[in-house]
Amino acid sequence: MGGPSAHTLAGRFLRGLALSPQRAAFRAGAETRTYEHTHELALRWAGSLLAAADGRPAAVGVLAGKGVTAYTGILAALYAGAAVVPLRPDFPQARTRAMLDAAPLSAVIADGPGSAALPGLLGPGGDVPVLVPDDAVLGTGLRRVAVRDRHTLDAPVAVRPEDRAYLLFTSGSTGRPKGVPLTHGNTSHYFDLLDRRYDFSPDDVFSQTFDLNFDCSLFDLFCAWGAGATAQWIPPQGYRDLPGYLAEHRMTVWFSTPSGISLARRTGALAPGALPGLRWSFFAGEALKCQDTADWQQAAPGSVVENLYGPTEFTVTIAAHRWDPELSPGLAVNGVVPIGAVHEGHAYELLDADGRVVADEGELCVSGPQMAPGYLDPADAAGRFVERDGRMWYLTGDRVRRVGDPAGGQLAYLGRMDAQVQLQGWRVELAEIDHALSTVEGVTEAVTVDAVTDDGIRLVVFYTGPEAVRPAAFAKQLGEVLPQGLLPKRYVLLGEMPLNANRKVDRKELRNRAGALIAAGKEGGGSRGN
């Protein structure tokens, strides 16, 4: 069979190679590699994987931090015709083992820390071939892939649209990782649409803020590589002087969770005109607030700002709203930027609690070519992938509302279906409480969580700001939203919101803290957290 189509992920890198052979494909710390060098090394690694696996591997784990091994490893797995399974060396081993149990690997590509973790992950007798850089030490009992020049491929292995390109994992409501296979057909539709929507070029430099096991990292890498542009890792110290870091590396495309805006604000990076080099700014993964967007736009006046939305099961993002300072605030609900219109080529419906189609507000249900073919474990699909009217749909679990001109198809995000809390017969929207709290003077950010106690569900508020706010000020504002008997009795000031590995506000951690406070009997008034 011939080489890959331009509509595959490997084909996108080849397109970038043709445009920018001597430009940097990626930069990570002191490591920079050109398209040409990365391509040649990936062909060598891919051929060695094929030889070690005695045929085309089905799935290749990439157990490495951001750097040459990780970025080249992703490409090598694709060149070998395998599905990429991005894994993190610093994840709890029990969680990674659960992923490996769900998606048995044909081979692993690992850096030093990754190879050190492998004996504990694969266990004794694990016979998975492991490719590590020449200077990395491989643990005893593991089978090392012999990387030989004679194994180098002439071209990437051809793949079909239905073949798997990536295997990603979501936590799910139970915390057990759920495997989501994304096909080359899924990614083809997605990136073809992005190519038409954006004007990325070889002169662009993309931020690479997302961890490689987070679906949004596909946007970073394959939008950049399809345009012959550079993907630039943002290290933690890069946030200390974000304007200086972006200017030094000539960054033109930014993509992060909205929590990145809060972090930039705390470090003084949102002064007017502080980010003049940005052409495009994207945010996804959490609700994007109008005020945060306006502040970012003020700092990056030459940038178009978009709010992107989508579950992993729908290949990274499935809707987009382009910020307009005149129009967008009027479409917002609870101060949150709309998620926009669902991508062309897809159908969507809004469903009520009984699964009936409703006109204006309900759970978003989508069908179309970006939809994953299901979960690795078919048992996980119950209640999510469903057949309706002779076609398959995915129920997102997100409540949305149609806003603006019906012909425009704009949707506003209201929150998770399970973010509605039932208190004393009242159905309470946590997002609505958060919005009311954010208008209190002295509050920078507020998050309300529900803590389950022996006496039922109680609400606890965590907030950030320069100093503690009197509980009476919160109660006065929330009195317009909640009955008096349901007002939270606990308001906790934090220096900053805890973030999870994907730089989203870690609501699970906040729930744990709330439960600990209640269990300790610290009930009334405000306090300072840690």
Image (tube, rainbow, N blue to C red):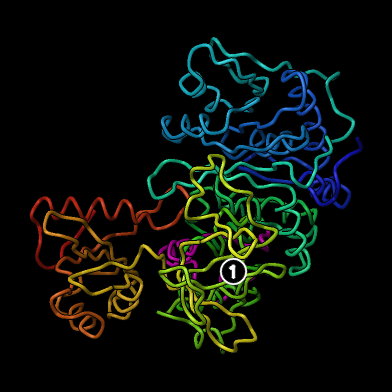
The x, y position of residue 96, in whole percent, is 47, 33
At 59% from the left edge and 54% from the top edge, which residue is drawn? 216
- Quick check: is 269 in the magenta stretch? yes
Which residue is at the far front? 390
* Image quadrant in which you'd find residue 510: bottom left
Tell me the quadrant of the picture where the N terminus can be found: top right
Q: Nearer the viewer, residue 289 or 22?
A: 289
Specify start and end residues of the magenta stretch as a single range. 250-276
Q: Is residue 242 above or below residue 230?
A: below
Could you tell me which secondary element the residue under label 1 belongs to?
loop
Q: Is residue 92 above or below residue 478?
A: above
The x, y position of residue 427, in whole percent, is 28, 73
Q: Nearer the viewer, residue 511 or 281?
A: 511
In the image, taking residue 380 as reference, residue 12 lies left or right, namely: right
Looking at the picture, which amino acid does disc 1 mark?
Leu
Q: Is residue 250 above or below residue 415?
A: above
* Image quadrant in which you'd find residue 297: bottom right
The x, y position of residue 51, in whole percent, is 77, 19
In the image, taking residue 273 as reference, residue 269 lies left or right, namely: left
- Quick check: is 199 in the magenta stretch? no
At 37% from the left edge and 54% from the top edge, which residue is drawn? 506
Q: Nearer the viewer, residue 411 or 234?
A: 411
The x, y position of residue 323, in whole percent, is 59, 78
Residue marked by disc 1? 275
Q: Nearer the viewer, residue 19 or 10?
A: 10
In the image, taking residue 171 as reference, residue 68 lies left or right, namely: right
